Amino acid sequence: MENASPSQQQLSNLLEHYQAGRLDDAEMLATAISQDFPKHQFAWKVLGAVFGAKGRNSEAAVANQTAVALSPKDAEAHNNLGNTLKQLGKLDEALASYKQAISLKPNFVLAHYNLGNTLKQLGKLDEALESYRQAISLKTDFV
């Protein structure tokens, strides 16, 4: 089962539960998939989002770190990890995650925005302003 993957139906169900806000169902399915297929990154990514939405940030950090470890070139996973680290007050680590997301996907508007918010929180206003400007230059209607 090492190389096996969850069925497309399981993944579709997981995404449907999460997008519909059925977080308990999403958590149960993501947990089951991550136990059955521990090297399948998507379940870990969803699990991190579910834990984050439920305010369980320490658990979200573990799930997001696993997602990043399994797929280190996934810019969204790095951004998600940054969000969790920011919630945990680990601002310098969050900055590193956002910067990694941007290095992987330079036009990732949300990562530029999140980087700006974290820089602002650290009192680095000039750098924050530059991140916000970058986000707006990439998506002119980004507010």
Image: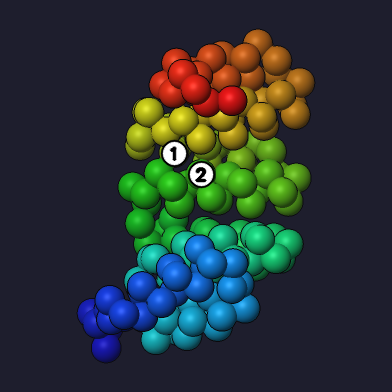
Name which residue lies at 73% across and 51% down: 88
Q: Is residue 138 depicted above or below 87 in this figure?
A: above
Q: Is residue 107 depicted above or below 37 in this figure?
A: above
Tell me the amino acid under the disc marked 2: Asn
Is disc 2 placed on a helix, strand or loop?
Answer: helix
Q: Quadrant of the N terminus?
A: bottom left
- Residues under numbered marks 1 and 2 in contact, where contact means CB atoms less than 8 Å apart: yes
For disc 2, the neighbor class at 10 Å (few under 14, some 14 to 19, many from 20) is many
Mark 1, residue position: 101
* Image x and y of residue 18, in percent: 52, 67
Q: Which mark is residue 116?
A: none
Can residue 20 be seen at all in this image of the molecule? yes
Is disc 1 placed on a helix, strand or loop?
Answer: helix
Spatial CA span between label 1 and label 2: 6 Å
Mark 2, residue position: 79
Tell me the amino acid under the disc marked 1: Ala
In this view, which residue lies farthest toward the top? 126
Name which residue lies at 38% across and 66% down: 41
Can residue 44 be seen at all in this image of the molecule? no
Q: Is residue 15 depicted above or below 73 in this figure?
A: below
